[in-house]
Image: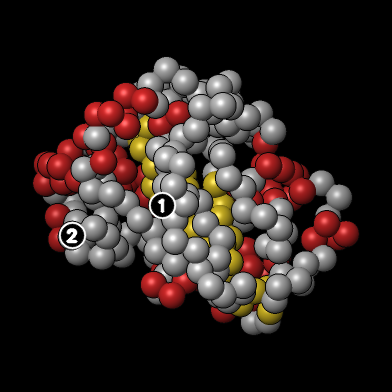
Amino acid sequence: MIGGRTGSSALFPDAEGLATRLAADGYPFLRGIHDISQVLAARAEAFGRLEAVGEIAPPAVDGIATGASRREEAVADLGARGNRFRRVRVCAVSHGPRIRETMGTVVSQPMHAQDYMFLRPAPVGRSTGPHCGYPFFARAIEAVFTVWTAFGPVPISDGPLAVVEGSHRFADLVEATRGFGVARDSAHKAGPAEDQVSFAHARGRVRLSTDVRFQLVGAPQGPRYFGPNPGGTTGAGYGELNRAKPLTGPWHIR
C-alpha cells in the first residue's frame, strides 16, 4: 500500500480510469505488470555481480549484504561497469515491452524509456531522501514520467518507498523547482532539508530497484539521457551513481 490506496491494478487497462487516478494522486500504483520470472532472473544476475566482488553473500538472489567489498580493487572503471548493467536482464524488465505498453496505456500515447537508468542496490540504512525529480529530467521537455520497479520482495523491514499523494499539487514546492537544473545550479537542492528516518541496523537485506524515466515517442531526446553512453544529470555518467560504488560506501545524495 502506498499512501491511502491499495493500488490501481484493478483499473488496468482502463486508460480513462488510470488517467483520472494519475491526475488525482500524481501516480498509479500497479502490481503484477512484470513477468515475475524475468524479475527474479534480473535480480539474480545483478546480485551475482555483487557477489563476485564480495558485497553480497551467496546465494546471490537472497540479496544479503556482507558488509565488505572488493569492488574497487577488482574493477578499474566503475562507470563502465555501471553502464554494462544496461545490457543485462534488468533492462529486459525496466525497458521491456510490458512496461512500454503499460506506460502507453496510462498516458494514452506511445511511450519509450530514456536510455539512462538508475539501478539502486540499497542496503538497509541507505536511502535517497525526499525529493522532486523534475529538476533532474525536465530540462528538454516537461512531460517525463518516473517508473519505479522493485526487483524482488520489498517488506517494510527493508525500507519503504514513500510517495506523497497529491504532492504534484503542492504549488509552493512545485514552483520552487521551476527553471533550474541540479547539474547547472548545484547550490539549489531538489528536496527539503529534513532527513528521513534512519534505520538502526548497519547491514541486512539489499533492496534492488530501478528508476527509469519514460517520455512520449517523438518528444525531444535530451543528450544527457539517451545514447550508448549517456552522461546523466551531471555529465559524469554511471560512475557517479550508487550502483557503480561499493555497497559499503556512502549513499549518493544530491
Q: How many marks?
A: 2
- Under tag 1, what secondary structure? strand
Residue receiving disc 2: 4
Q: On the rendered image, what quadrant is the C terminus found in?
A: top right
Q: Residue at x 16, y 46 (%)?
A: 21
Q: Residue at x 24, y 29 (%)?
A: 171
Where residue 178 sits, quadrant-wise, is: top left
Residue at label 1? 148
Instruction: Left or right? Give the position of 191 relative to 85.
Output: left
- Position of residue 236 measured from the top left corner of the image (x, y, whole percent): 69, 33
Look at the image and tell me in which quarter the N terminus lies. bottom left
Nearer the N terminus, badge 2 or badge 1?
2
Horizontal side, residue 251 vs residue 171: left or right: right
The 10 Å Cα crowd at callout 2, few under 14, some 14 to 19, many 20 or more, is few
SS of the residue at dot 2? loop
Q: Quadrant of residue 32?
A: bottom left
Can the viewer see residue 92 in this picture?
Answer: no
Residue 232 image point, x, y percent: 60, 33
Residue furthest front in the image:
194
Please name which of the two marks, 2 or 1, marks the residue nearer to the observer. Answer: 2
Q: Identify the residue at horizontal 71%, vertical 63% (top origin).
A: 248
Residue 144 visible in this rendered orientation of the protein: yes
227 vs 174, left or right, is right
Q: Within 10 Å of the Cα at label 1, are there few (<14), some (14-19), or many (20+) other Cα atoms?
A: some
Task: Please name the residue shown 40% across and 74% down the image.
Answer: 155
